[in-house]
Image (tube, coloured by chain):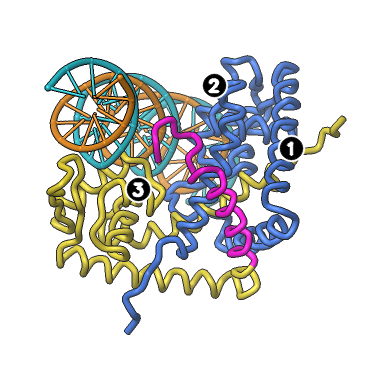
Chain colours: A yellow, B blue, C orange, D cyan
Amino acid sequence: MTTDSFELDQFLPYRLNRAAEFVGLRFAAHYKAKYGLTRPEWRTLAALGSSGRMTSKAVGIHSSMHKTKVSRAVFALEQRRWLKRSQDDGDRRLEHLELTPAGQQAYRELIELARRYQAELEAELGGSGIEALSTGLAAIEQVIRRSGKGKLPEPDDL
Amino acid sequence: MTTDSFELDQFLPYRLNRAAEFVGLRFAAHYKAKYGLTRPEWRTLAALGSSGRMTSKAVGIHSSMHKTKVSRAVFALEQRRWLKRSQDDGDRRLEHLELTPAGQQAYRELIELARRYQAELEAELGGSGIEALSTGLAAIEQVIRRSGKGKLPEPDDL
DNA sequence: AATTGATGGTTACATTTGCAACCATATCGT
DNA sequence: ACGATATGGTTGCAAATGTAACCATCAATT
């Protein structure tokens, strides 16, 4: 029969969103200021940089982005000459993406930024905070995996 | 000199964002389907429902939303006759917001939904997962508080 | 009381997003 | 071999968001 009390700032979805926004925007400010990158672009770069040549779909899976976001990010990075596409010989529907040397260079700089930011964060949160956070996130990640990939509000695919 | 390795899925901002999106969208699906509410509207409702009469600015602070989001959410809720505004006698710039009986009713139903969802989440994550997550989030919340309110990418106010 | 500056709130405009429809190619069932 | 269905990817359009400018009122200074 549920009393009347409810506090937004004890509600997990709210807390998570708030924390993610804070941490995410603060990081985004760095690379946005320095390279004019959007978040989908940064993620695409990170995916390609760390795992090498792959298709758009694979980028989406690797970085949890919808295909349209990936599509537009790929286009932007291509304009910038940071990645190039190449057709698959066997299956002409798909194209493989790969960073150009300039893209790889940018990637290296970006992950350096990312590492520094993560270190800064770890300093701010303290060892126990980081550890707790990571454990908690791991629990959610497991739920995501269980619930069939992370696909939920997407009527299409991932 | 920093080796070359970098994995997106070990990067905290990414992990947080992913988790927040998953948890948040799954909850949003509930109230969106049932009431056609947007997230800013739900937050506004929650703020007013739990803390009673307050101004738009207070809603923004209470629920971490920019003034424009609040403004539009308030407008939408007003259309729906879930809240009413009233002018302050002393200071004619500000208006006080209050839920109508219909709004309060909706609020009660919504927080019931929220409670059920949080319970579901706790079941999925397990006691230790929840505890870790909460501790980790608390650490971030403290950093947010320290960094002057949470204001960071906002050139305006909150 | 007139000027200056802050504050609560709204609005116009550009950018970003999500969704659905779409195109081209590939695969499956018959 | 042929139609149905699926898949990788792009695009058009509507809705959501961020930013800055704005309006009205209030407060402080002179």
Residue B103 falls inside the magenta stretch: no
Identify the residue under disc 3.
Answer: A60
Going 72% across and 48% down the picture, which residue do you hit?
B122
Asked if labels 1 and 2 touch by Cβ distance under 8 angstroms, the answer is no
Region rendered in magenta:
A132-158
Whole-percent x and y of residue A118? 46, 69
- Name the kind of residue labelled 1 in the image: Arg
State the count of labels: 3
Q: Quadrant of the N terminus of chain B?
A: bottom left
- Label 2 secondary element: helix
Is C21 or B74 nearer to us in this picture?
C21
Q: Nearer the viewer, residue D23 or B41?
A: B41
Contact between labelled residues 3 and 1, with CB atoms less than 8 Å apart: no
Q: Are marks 2 and 3 in contact (CB under 8 Å)?
A: no
Write down the quadrant of residue B100 in the picture.
Answer: top right
Per the model, the C-alpha gap separating discs 2 and 3 is 34 Å
- For disc 3, the chain is A
At 17% from the left and 58% from the top, the residue drawn is: A82
Pointer 2 or 1: first along the chain: 2
Residue bearing the label numbered 2: B76
Which residue is disc 1 drawn over? B115
Q: Characterize the magenta stretch by its predominant secondary structure.
A: helix
Disc 3 on helix, strand or loop? helix
